[in-house]
Image: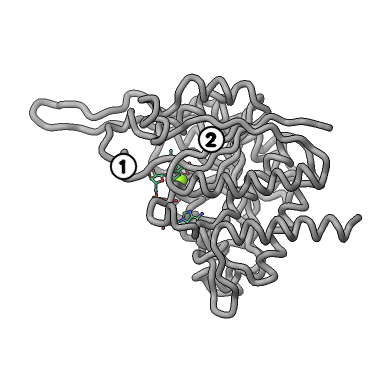
């Protein structure tokens, strides 16, 4: 039986609840399709700080380096909000992304037909939306040096540095062109090149690389305009490529189009390693209440099967089971609309699992 080792980093807040849901789905898929998923847990984020004093313990890093893929929940929460930036749970996440060189973060935003009424936008605007944000993940202002809060005479000054080398830009831009080539062949590059030198270089590199992809249509948008066009004409986008901070912000905005942040999965890919996690954070406001939407994490596990293990059939089955659960009217509170069935995290997970069984019986 083919076997795959997965590092599970549940993290904080709703992290443990939603990773547990994805694990149940993986275990069912393993049984139905004949794969052995070996799951090993590691600490990251606030819980890691509490237990070891570090947001990314060496042991966790070693577990990830020795696994075939990583599945992560989310990190952070009010308990750790007063720590200095370099000691916060979020540093664990930045650390693992950097250590595994996960430079391309793929964040698909797809509107499921039954969820069209869950979006605050008009039906005809969101209908047919299916784009993917390719966010650079290991550079930009999240990592640039110098950074810190310094004293300038008597007053404090906060400094962060926006920085990209041309190689860092080129590798993620190439990745985005390749993805666009396999889709509808349209690439929107997002920057702020009217103000920032980093962005001027970004745009230059996109233009240079576009010569190798003459079949892909390229559009450049300033990030402020893109934020607006994304909710005005979301269905016109195919692949959006952008830097770390712009991609972080735009992908949360994309979630509104699809109905909820609880719907968006992601894959963080490097040349050698891969990590899968929902786009959302640890949602402390709903943690422990059993109401978190597990779909973003379940779909992240599906991306893991597709991108890391090449198990397309099993990944398709998960995606279809999620779609069917929505078609049959099951909704966690974040996507609830009148006339549908409100369920919690666990029930939504069980519904998806039983639909997986149903789909496999049907195709047997
Ligand atoms: N990848 C990660 O681990 C991330 C961690 N964070 C951290 O998470 C903490 C909370 O940050 P926020 O800004 O509140 O962002 P958040 O993404 O955790 O939550 C934003 C809003 O979306 C809702 N939400 C998020 N995921 C949901 C789900 N699966 N089902 C239903 N509703 C969901 C939350 O209840 C909240 O109202 C902070 O400590 C932040 O630093 C934030 C973003 C990403
Ligand atoms: C918590 C941050 C490090 C990251 C974030 O918001 C994200 O990756 O979406
Ligand atoms: Mg974010």
Q: Looking at the image, which is closer to me, 79 or 327?
A: 79
Quarter of the picture for ligand 2?
Answer: top left
Give the residue at mark 2: 9
Q: Position of residue 91 (x, y in %)?
A: 40, 31
> Which residue is farthest right?
364
Q: Is mark 2 within 8 Å of ligand 1?
A: no
Tag 2's secondary structure? Answer: strand
Which residue: 24% across, 33% down?
158
Asked whether, in this view, residue 32 is left or right of residue 247, the answer is right
Q: Is residue 360 visible?
A: yes
Residue 161, above or below 331: above
Q: Position of residue 74 (x, y in %)?
A: 48, 42
Numbered label attached to residue 227: none
Q: Mark 1 and mark 2: span between their CA atoms? A: 19 Å
> Which residue is farthest bottom?
339
Residues at circles 1 and 2 in contact by the CB criterion of under 8 Å: no
Q: Quadrant of the C terminus?
A: bottom right
Tag 1's secondary structure? Answer: helix
Give the residue at mark 1: 79
Asked whether, in this view, residue 224 is left or right of residue 294, the answer is left
Which residue: 45% across, 47% down?
281
Asked whether, in this view, residue 53 is left or right of residue 317, the answer is left
Q: Looking at the image, which is closer to me, 275 or 127?
A: 275
Which residue: 55% across, 58% down?
345
Q: Position of residue 340 (x, y in %)?
A: 59, 75
N-terminal label among 1 and 2 = 2
- Give neighbour class at mark 1: few <14, some 14-19, many 20+ (Cα, 10 Å): few
Colour basis: one colour
Q: Is residue 193 visible?
A: no
Q: Quadrant of residue 355?
A: bottom right
Which residue: 59% across, 37% down?
71
Q: Quadrant of the N terminus?
A: top right
């Amino acid at each position: 039986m083919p076997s795959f080792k997965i590092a599970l980093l549940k993290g904080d807040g709703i992290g443990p609840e939603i990773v547990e849901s994805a694990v149940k789905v993986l275990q069912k898929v393993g049984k139905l399709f004949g794969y052995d998923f070996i799951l090993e847990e590691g600490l990251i984020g606030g819980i890691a700080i509490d237990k070891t004093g570090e947001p990314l313990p060496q042991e966790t890093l070693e577990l990830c380096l020795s696994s075939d893929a990583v599945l992560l929940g989310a990190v952070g929460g009010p308990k750790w909000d007063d720590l200095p930036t370099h000691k916060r749970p979020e540093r664990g996440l930045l650390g693992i992304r950097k250590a595994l060189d996960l430079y391309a973060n793929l964040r698909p935003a797809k509107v499921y037909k039954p969820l069209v009424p869950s979006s605050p936008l008009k039906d005809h605007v969101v209908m047919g939306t299916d784009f993917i944000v390719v966010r650079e993940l290991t550079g930009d202002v999240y990592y640039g040096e110098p950074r810190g809060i310094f004293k300038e005479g008597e007053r404090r000054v906060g400094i962060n540095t926006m920085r990209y080398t041309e190689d860092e830009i080129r590798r993620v831009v190439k990745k985005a062109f390749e993805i666009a080539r396999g889709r509808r062949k349209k690439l929107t590059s997002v920057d702020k090149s009217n103000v920032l030198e980093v962005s001027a270089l970004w745009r230059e590199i996109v233009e240079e690389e576009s010569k190798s992809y003459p079949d892909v249509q390229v559009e450049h948008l300033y990030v402020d305009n893109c934020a607006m066009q994304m909710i005005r004409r979301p269905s016109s986008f195919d692949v959006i490529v952008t830097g770390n901070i712009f991609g972080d912000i735009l992908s949360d905005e994309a979630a509104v189009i699809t109905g909820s942040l609880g719907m968006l999965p992601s894959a963080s890919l490097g040349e050698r390693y891969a990590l899968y996690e929902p786009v959302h954070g640890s949602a402390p406001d709903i943690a422990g209440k059993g109401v978190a939407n597990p779909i973003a994490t379940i779909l992240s596990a599906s991306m893991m099967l597709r991108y890391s293990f090449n198990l397309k059939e099993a990944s398709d089955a998960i995606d279809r089971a999620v779609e069917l659960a929505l078609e049959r009217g099951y909704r966690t509170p974040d996507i609830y609309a009148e006339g549908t069935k409100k369920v919690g995290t666990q029930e939504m997970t069980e519904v998806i699992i039983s639909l997986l069984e149903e789909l496999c019986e049907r195709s047997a």
